[in-house]
Image: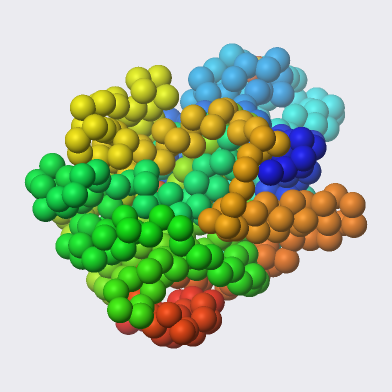
Amino acid sequence: MLRAEDNELLTRTGPLTGMGQLFRRFWLPVLLSEELPQPDCPPVRLQVMGEKLLAFRDTSNRVGLIEPHCAHRGANLFWGRNEQNGIRCAFHGWKYDFQGRCLEMPTVPKNEAYEKLRGEARLKSYPTQEAGGYVWAYMGPAEHMPPLPEFEFMKLPRANTFVSKKLQQCNWAQACEGALDTAHFSFLHMSVGEDDDDDRAMKIMNQSEAAASGDKNRVRWMKNDGMPRFSITEHEAGLLMGAARTADNDDLYWRLSQFMMPSHALAPSTFPGENYHGQTFVPIDDELCWIYTYTWNPERPLTNMERERFSKGHTVHANVDKNYVPIRNRENDYLIDRDEQKHVSFTGITGVSEQDACVQDSQGFIADRTREMLGPTDLGIVRFRRMILEQTKALLNKGQEPPAAGKPESYMIRAGGTVAHSSKPLAEVMTLRFGNPIGRAQPTPAQH
Ligand code: FES
Ligand SMILES: [Fe+2]
């Protein structure tokens, strides 16, 4: 549980809040590149951590991220013309470039005051970069701007990756905690009944990578052991979280996830050769967030069939409409099928992503953490909160910058699953699975 003031600190991300300042020390994805498909295409309205913004791709393929209201009389530049390396206000034709600089003021006489006025008409803007299929933005102080984090999926050919986004109708922190709470798989994502060979049960289970791989052992181990034992290691980017379940003989089934500052989580399911998955939680405001979701395979391009499945909602990817809103959502009770819940799946809701969204949303728009009863399987969440709150307080009270922001190479890590003898501690299990005690990704042929 958290004290009320810590819950506030954890969940509020506006520009004047502590967590808002911490988040603004990091690059964050703010759009899919495909939302701005070509130079001079229509601009896009967006909101990030409570700030309303406008994004546009200019003639030279640069992405501008600027405050949306024209300096003249405040018309919204969303209605403007995106033309010749700038966006021109629809009201009286003032024009701005991708850094918010005013280029032209056609209603102002070109006398000696013109240039001064033009300088003052500059709009707030944030730097952007494109990588891995996302537009990333840095919204913090210029003097602290770090390099872009080096996620493995951003270094691979696009053929090896699939990226998406989905709306989540709750605060960013409980969505992020849902990804770090790997104990829930034994319940939330399970089939019910004794017979996993039942066609309908397998259909439900196939939405998860473990079952899609055809490895029924993993499903059985998760089903039989709902109380995984957690081992946690702090590293430069964040936290490695190992959850060990009883497997066969003297073995443990390990699900190894990663948290990276400030709001990235890598999924724990992947066995060697399978696809890797990660998610980044970006607050829209304090009651909504975007989840940017990425899948990658370091060894081969993804197949068309895999892309097709992900785009319709599979594992961490949701089935979304053209606005990236999940088809099964808060408003329609996630299209729960109570008969299916009785006989087939634990939730009666189709889709791993949608099952996650349902329970996380159901904690409230902002979960009340003062009334929780945490136990040993919540250790990952406890450590996540401790790390991010400590770093927020250090930034606020001592001016200490979050260390991970300045270490982009520390984001080149993997998460996944493995089976190991019960005598082996986490670091050894990681070395066996990834060749490295914290899961640092080794260069692969595809990267050369
Ligand atoms: S309000 Fe934009 S040019 Fe007048
Ligand atoms: Fe889940």
Residue 296 image position (x, y, % from top left) = 34, 63
* 215 is higher (above) or lower (below) than 422: above
Residue 83 image position (x, y, % from top left) = 48, 33
Residue 148 image position (x, y, % from top left) = 58, 62
Residue 291 image position (x, y, % from top left) = 47, 43
* 209 is higher (above) or lower (below) than 447: above
Colour scheme in use: rainbow
* 358 is higher (above) or lower (below) than 440: above
Snapshot quadrant of residue 107: top right
The residue at 68%/48% (across/down) is 23
How many numbered callouts?
0
Q: Is residue 260 left or right of residue 141?
A: left
Q: Nearer the viewer, residue 136 or 165?
A: 165
* 246 is higher (above) or lower (below) than 70: below
Q: Is residue 259 left or right of residue 22?
A: left
Q: Is residue 140 left or right of residue 37?
A: right
Snapshot quadrant of residue 2: top right
Q: Nearer the viewer, residue 22 or 125?
A: 22
The residue at 53%/56% (across/down) is 377
The residue at 69%/44% (across/down) is 1
State which quarter of the image contains the C terminus: bottom left
The residue at 44%/68% (across/down) is 244
One can see residue 296 in this view:
no
One can see residue 346 in this view:
yes
Snapshot quadrant of residue 278: bottom left
